[in-house]
Image (tube, rainbow, N blue to C red):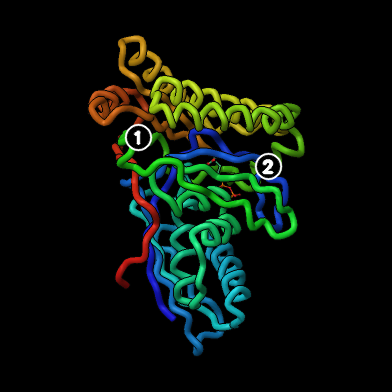
Amino acid sequence: MQAAARAHANIALIKYWGKRDSALNLPATGSISVTLEALHSETRVRFDPNLVTDAIMLESGGDAERVSRFLDLVRALAGMEMRADVRSRNNFPTGAGLASSASGFAALALAASRAAGIEASPSELSALARQGSGSAARSLYGGFVEMQRGRDDRTGADAHAVPLLAAHEWPLAVVVAIIDTGTKSVGSTDGMTRTAATSPFHDAWVAGADADLAAMRTAIRDRNLERVGELTEHSCLKMHATMLGAQPGLIYWQPATLAAWQTLADLRADGLAAYGTIDAGPQVKALCRIADADAVTAALAQVPGVRDVRISHLGPDASLIAD
Ligand code: DP6
């Protein structure tokens, strides 16, 4: 009745921003991400017949209520009522646009389903993690990962991630420029709802997704970093344009965000291939070759307002660990 798991954060290259169903947390579009070796969550779950409520300790912060609702899904699947003791920690800041819900719910899905004795395939685990947080479905896998939108609106069973390339098949680095680690003002879930309800650009964003995903799949298959980078920056800017069109507009950037973005453009002008992406927070993440990661780090560290810079290689699948 006890298990522990580690899952790594991921960064979307083709973004997920919008749901077609919030009860099952079904995405409006697919998405493509890379999993990061350096940023992970570790979660231990123990179901205990003596507990009357869930005892949830999120050492790095987070929403215990949301974890408890997720455990209800696991209990329903396992056909049991037992409450759980959960302990989780991240090795990076929570809730600051560094994808903590992704690694957190992926680790929780794996640990809780194992602790509850549920036999689940990787696709079933990914679909389960999606119900905790859409991006978490991708963190079950390492390397390059595609989240499939799926067609089954009744069960959502086909809205799960699939691996595209393992980390070792195309080793790259992601350099994360940390600008502000405070919790973001509007979380992804609320931000998506507001965007879909009020942004005149939302429909165009959804309509463009299939073409962006197809182009990215080809670029990844061809190991074409320049093309992957162009598509990554395009998807990021298009998502932020959609957010800016919401009412009230969602502005996740800070001045240093734009300065870091410009620094990457300057590096490219000097012949160094580094491409940025930004999620629902001010941090800038740059995709580059491993051999260039130190140069990218040095350039980003000089940007005023950048507090810290971390390099990550691409990471592995989520896995069970000793508890
Ligand atoms: C900007 O997965 O956090 O990082 O499903 O509501 O939990 P919920 O949203 P979440 O959204 C991630 C948004 C993003 C883009 C991405 O990771 O694809």
Which residue lies at the image location 42% right of the left edge and 48% below the top edge? 9
- The image quadrant of residue 129 is bottom right
Q: Position of residue 115 (x, y in %)?
A: 45, 76
Q: Which residue is mark 1?
A: 174
Q: Position of residue 14 (x, y in %)?
A: 53, 33
Where in the image, quadrant-wise, is ligand 1 located?
top right
At 67% across and 29% down in the image, what residue appears? Answer: 205
Mark 2: secondary structure? loop
Identify which residue, 3 or 175, lies in the foreground: 3
Would you identify the image quadrant in which residue 43 lies?
bottom left
Q: Amino acid at mark 1?
A: Val
Q: Residue at left 76%, top 34%? A: 198
Q: Is mark 2 within 8 Å of ligand 1?
A: no
Residue pointed to by mark 2: 28
The correct choice, above or below, for 309 with respect to 162 in the image is above
The mark lying in front, picked from 2 and 1, is 2
Distance of mark 2 from mark 1, alpha carbons? Answer: 27 Å
Split into 4 quadrants, where in the image is the N terminus? bottom left
Q: Which mark is residue 275?
A: none
What amino acid type should be assigned to the residue bearing mark 2? Ala
Quadrant of the frame with the C terminus: bottom left
User: Which of the pair 40/317 is nearer the observer?
Assistant: 317
Q: Residues within 10 Å of mark 1 (few under 14, many from 20)?
A: many
Task: From the viewer's perspective, tell me whether residue 160 is left or right of residue 174.
Answer: right
User: Residue at 38% across / 69% down in the picture?
Assistant: 4
Q: Quadrant of residue 320?
A: bottom left
What is the x, y in percent for residue 247? 73, 33
Which residue ends up furthest to the top in the rendered image?
Answer: 269
Residue 22 point in image, percent of width and height = 70, 53
Q: Secondary structure at mark 1?
A: strand
* Residue 256 in sight from this viewpoint: no
In-image side of 188 versus 282 (left or right): right
